[in-house]
């Protein structure tokens, strides 16, 4: 017999998987020429990913799928966000240096 709590957990994990896919689509469609938007999006998405990471870590005790989603799906997306944030930060620094040199 399936308990209501188990059904709710599975539905929640499936919702997280869909949200991860949505975040991935957003991150891969960013316009790197608009550095400010890239940095803001990265910060917001990383905050949400951190919340999901914490939730999935708590669910691992009762559901193995939570660990799979956290390690196989969420972690690579968080790595991508970190990579894009670092790239955007470096581009900001290059623009700043160009502004100083043009004075």
Image (tube, rainbow, N blue to C red):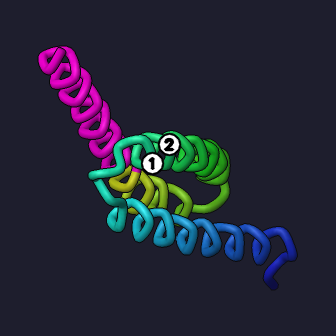
Residue 85 among magenta residues: yes
Q: In this orientation, which residue lies closer to the viewer: 15 or 88? A: 88
Q: Position of residue 100 (x, y in %)?
A: 20, 15
Look at 44% across and 56% down and name the residue there: 74
Say which mark, if any, is on residue 37: 1
Screen quadrant of the C terminus:
top left
SS at mark 2 in the image: helix
In this rendering, position of residue 83 left or right of residue 98:
right
Say which mark, if any, is on residue 53: none
Q: Position of residue 3 (x, y in %)?
A: 84, 76
Q: Contact (CB < 8 A) between labels 1 and 2?
A: yes
Q: Identify the residue at the far front of this view.
A: 103
In this rendering, position of residue 43 left or right of residue 35:
right
Q: CA distance from mark 1 to mark 2?
A: 5 Å
Q: Which residue is mark 2?
A: 40
Screen quadrant of the N terminus:
bottom right
Q: Position of residue 60 (x, y in %)?
A: 59, 52
Crowding near the residue tagged with mark 1, few <14, some 14–19, many ≥20 C-alpha atoms within 10 Å: some
Crowding near the residue tagged with mark 2, few <14, some 14–19, many ≥20 C-alpha atoms within 10 Å: few
SS at mark 1 in the image: helix
Dominant SS of magenta comes to: helix
Q: In this orientation, which residue lies closer to the viewer: 65 or 100? A: 100
81 w.r.t. 72: above or below = above
Q: Identify the residue at the far right of this view.
A: 4
Look at 60% across and 51% down and name the residue there: 52
13 w.r.t. 51: above or below = below
Look at 46% across and 71% down and name the residue there: 21
Magenta-colored span: 78-103
Residue 61 among magenta residues: no
Quadrant hosting residue 95: top left
């Amino acid at each position: 017999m399936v308990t209501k709590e188990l059904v709710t957990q599975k539905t929640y994990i499936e919702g997280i998987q869909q949200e991860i896919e949505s975040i991935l689509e957003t991150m891969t469609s960013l316009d790197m020429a608009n550095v400010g938007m890239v940095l803001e999006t990265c910060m917001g998405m990383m905050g949400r990913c951190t919340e999901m990471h914490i939730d999935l870590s708590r669910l691992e005790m009762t559901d193995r799928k939570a660990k799979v989603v956290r390690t196989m799906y969420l972690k690579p997306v968080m790595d991508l966000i970190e990579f894009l944030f670092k790239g955007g930060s470096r581009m900001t620094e290059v623009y700043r240096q160009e502004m100083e040199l043009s004075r």
